[in-house]
Amino acid sequence: MSEPLASADVVLDAIATTRAIRRYRPDPIPDADLARIMFAASRAPSGSNRQGFRFVVLRDGPAAIEAKAVLGEAFRGGWNAKRTGDGYDSGSGAADDSPKARTARAMQHFVDNFEATPVVVLVCMLRKRGHITDGGSVYPACQNLLLAARALGYGGVMTMWHLTVENRLREILAIPDAVEVMATIPLGRPQGSHGPVRRRPLTELVFDDRWDGEAAWAVEPAGTRHTSAGPPGSGRPR
Ligand SMILES: Cc1cc2nc3c(=O)[nH]c(=O)nc-3n(C[C@H](O)[C@H](O)[C@H](O)COP(=O)(O)O)c2cc1C
C-alpha cells in the first residue's frame, strides 16, 4: 500500500506537536498503554534490521526503585552542571518571567522529582561497534516511543544524564558489559501539555540542489513559530 494515509494530518500533527515533557502527574501508565508504546518503539528500523535495541522498563519494582534513585542523583548533577555552564541564571535568566527562567524551573522540577517519574525506559544497544552511525540503529526507536506516548496522551523526553552512572545501573539491573545504555526516557501523563514545537525556519534547515541552495518550495504550514536556538543553517548569514 503506497497511497497517502487518510490520517496523514493526524500523523504529521503528532510529529509537529510532540514536545519534550519533563513534568508528570503521578498516575501510573497502565500495562496495555505501555505495551502499545513499546510495540511502536520496537517497530523502528535499524541497520540490516539487526534490531540491536533493547528496552529496560523501570516502574515500581525493587530494582527499578533503586535505579531511579541512582538516576535521580545523576540527573540533579547533570542539570546543576548545565544550569551553571549554560548560564541559566544570568542574562535574561535573571528575570523570573523570561523563557530561560521558565525552562530552568521546569528542569529543576524535573530533576527534583525524578524518583516519582511513573516510567523510565533505558534504551539499550547490543554490540556497539564504536562507529559514529551506531546511534542510528537505536534513536529511531526512541522517537517512535515518544510519538506513541504522545498519541496515547503521555509525554516524555530523551535524555543522556545516565552516562555518569551507567556502571551502577549495570550492577543494579544486571545489564551485560557488552550492552550500552544509549538513552534514558522518562514517561508519564504530562502536567503541562504538548503543543507545536519550535525550530528554525525550514529554509534555514533544508537546502536545494547544493549546500546552502535556497529551497523556495520548502514552505511551512501557516502560523509556524520559530526559535533561534542552536547554530544557524549554513553558518553564513543570509
Ligand atoms: C540526543 C538528545 C539528548 C538530550 N539530552 C537531554 C538531557 O540529558 N536532559 C534533558 O532534560 N533533555 C535532553 N534532551 C531533550 C532536548 O533538550 C529537547 O528534545 C529539545 O530541547 C527540544 O525540545 P522540544 O521538542 O520540547 O522543543 C535531549 C534530546 C536529544 C535529542
Image (cartoon, rainbow, N blue to C red):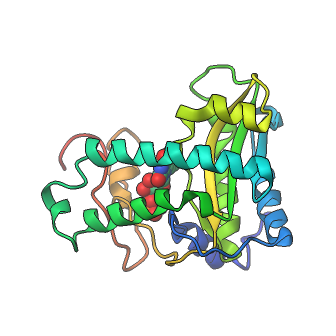
* Vertical position of residue 125 compared to residue 14: above or below: above
Residue 92, quarter of picture? bottom left
- Quadrant of the drawing holding the N terminus: bottom right
Location of residue 186 by image quarter: bottom right
Residue positioned 49% across, 47% down in the render: 75
Determine the residue positioned at 63% across, 37% down.
Answer: 182
Single out the residue that lies furthest toward the top.
130
Residue 107, image x and y in percent? 41, 59
Q: Is residue 230 left or right of residue 38?
A: left
- How many callouts does the rendering have? 0
* Image coordinates for residue 38, horizontal then vertical, percent: 79, 58
Q: In the image shown, does 145 or 83 lie closer to the viewer?
A: 83
- Taking 79 as reference, is 123 left or right? right
Q: Is residue 30 above or below residue 41?
A: below
State the image coordinates of residue 108 (x, y, percent, origin top left). 40, 60
Q: Decide if residue 218 is in sight here.
A: no
